Image (tube, grey):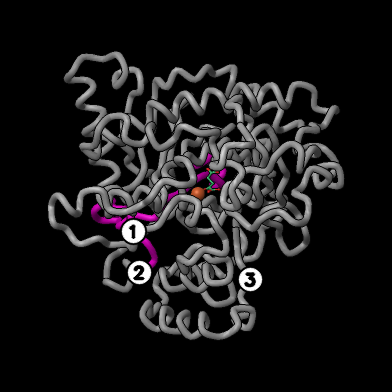
Amino acid sequence: MARAAPTAQIEQVSIAKFRTGSAAERDAQVAALRRAFARQGMVSLVDTGVAQETIDETIAKSRDFFALPQARKEHFGSPPGYPPRSFGAITSPRGKHYHLQQQDEEGNILNEWLQTRNTSVQVDWSDPYYSCPEGQELYSSEAKHPEQQVWPEEVSGLQDAIATYYGAMEELSKVMYELFAVALELEPNFFLKLAQRAPIWPVTIAHYPPQTRTPSEDRARIQPHWDRTLFAMITTSDVGDEESGGGLQILVDSETGEGVDGRAKLEGRSVEWQNVVRPAGAYVVNVGEMMSRWSNGRMRHVVHRVANPVVNHTDPGRVSLMAYVLTDYDAVVECLHCTADGSEPMYEPTWVGEMMNWGSKLSIYNHTKQEMMRQAQGLYLANGTQTALGEPTDVKSVEASMMRCQKDDSSSCGLTASS
Ligand SMILES: O=C(O)CCC(=O)C(=O)O
Ligand SMILES: [Fe+2]
C-alpha cells in the first residue's frame, strides 16, 4: 500500500486574513477558496484561531478512549432502535457514541469512530422543529437516551475536552459559512441564517491504529468516497502521514490536477491519488455533495480515501478530528443561481434532513442503493473491492438496475452498505 504518491498542490486560505486583513487580503482568500473548489475540491486552512492546546488535548483524550478494552468502547455504542441516519446513528446534543468502522479479515481494527455532538446550544424540546417526527429522527433527547450523557470515568476530562473542541468548531464553522457565501456571491449570512438551531452535525473522531500486517486489497483505513455534508474541517495527529503512506489522499486528473471520480478513466483521462500534506496546525477543508448541489457544481466535492500505512511504521496510529458541518435539517438544498443565470440544475431539489437519511429517496443516500451508486461512479466493484479506476463502469446500466431494484423488494438486492 505504501507506494510513494505525489503531493497534491492545495491552495491555502488564511482565516485571520479573511476576518481582519485588508480588503485585498480578504478578497484573495475568497478568490483562492473559489478557485480551489471549482478545480479540485480541497483547501488548507491556516491561522484559524483554534488553539493548538485544544487540538492536542482532544487528540490525547481520544487516544486514551480508543485504548480502552474493546468491550468497554462498545458499551458506548449506539443502542438498538436508533433511526438509520448518516454518521452511524444520531447522537443527543451533548452526547457521543462509539462506532467500529472497518476491520481487516483477521478482526484487527483499521478505523474506529467516536461520534460527538457536544454543543452548548440549548434544545427546547417543545419547539416543533425538534419535537416533530423529522426532528425526533435527528435529535435524540437526553430523556430518551440518558446513556448518551454517561462518559467513561476512566478517561477523565474527555467530555470537557470534546465540549471545548466542539465549541471551537462551531465558531470556526460560522466564519466558514461566511467565506463560502461570499465566494458564491451570496449574502454573507446566507448559510449562517440557515444554521440557527442546535447543530445536527458531529465532530467525528477517527482512530486508525498502526498496522502490523497488510490487509486485503478491499480494506483500507477508509475507502474512496466523497462526503455528503456541506463541508468538512479536518485536522489530525500527524503531519507527515505521507511518510507512512497512511494519510489522506485525493483523486485527481494527473495532468490538470482537477478533482475527478472513477469515471474520468473511462473518458481517457489519466488519474492518480495524491497525498494531502497539511501544514502543521492547519485544517484541510473539503466540500461535500450538499455544497455541490447548492452551488450546482461551481464547488465540487472531491473523491478521497485514507490508504493503509507501511506495516510497523513507527507512528502511534492516526487520530483525525473531523467536523462535518451542515445547516439545520429543514434547509432546502437546490441550485442557488439557476433562476438568475438560466443554467440547468444538475440535481433535483432536496433538503438537508433527507440527505442525512439512510432511507433517503435520493438513491445515492439510500442505504441499500449506495453501493450500487458507488460502483456506477467507479469507486467500487460489485464485491466491494476498490476499483482499479480503469474498470469499465456503465453508469446508465447501473442506474437502470437500480430502478429495477427500487420496484422490487429492496432487500432482494442483497447489497451491504459501507460507511
Ligand atoms: O481521516 C481523514 O483524514 C479523513 C477520513 C474521511 O474522509 C472520512 O471519514 O470521511
Ligand atoms: Fe470523507
Question: In the figure, 18 relative to 98: above or below?
Answer: above
Q: Residues within 10 Å of mark 2 (few under 14, many from 20)?
A: many
Q: Measure the C-alpha gap from mark 3 to mark 2.
A: 22 Å
Side of 377 relative to 104 (left or right): left
Where on the picture, by quarter, is residue 145?
top right
Question: In the figure, 357 relative to 53: above or below?
Answer: below
Q: Is residue 163 visible?
A: yes
Q: Quadrant of the C terminus?
A: bottom right
Cβ atoms at labels 3 and 1 below 8 Å apart: no
Residue located beneath label 1 in the image: 260
Q: Measure the C-alpha gap from mark 3 to mark 1.
A: 25 Å
Side of 60 relative to 373 (left or right): right
Where on the picture, by quarter, is residue 287?
top left
Q: Nearer the viewer, residue 255 or 196?
A: 196
Instruction: Residue 246: say if magenta.
Output: yes
Q: Residues within 10 Å of mark 1 (few under 14, many from 20)?
A: many
For the record, the magenta segment spans 241-262
Kindly identify the amino acid type of the residue bearing the numbered disc 3.
Thr
Q: Nearer the viewer, residue 247 or 404?
A: 404
Cβ atoms at labels 2 and 1 below 8 Å apart: yes
Q: Measure the C-alpha gap from mark 2 to mark 1.
A: 8 Å
Q: Quadrant of the N terminus?
A: bottom right
Callout 2 secondary element = helix
Residue located beneath label 2 in the image: 263
Residue located beneath label 3 in the image: 416
Callout 1 secondary element = loop
N-terminal-most mark, 3 or 2: 2
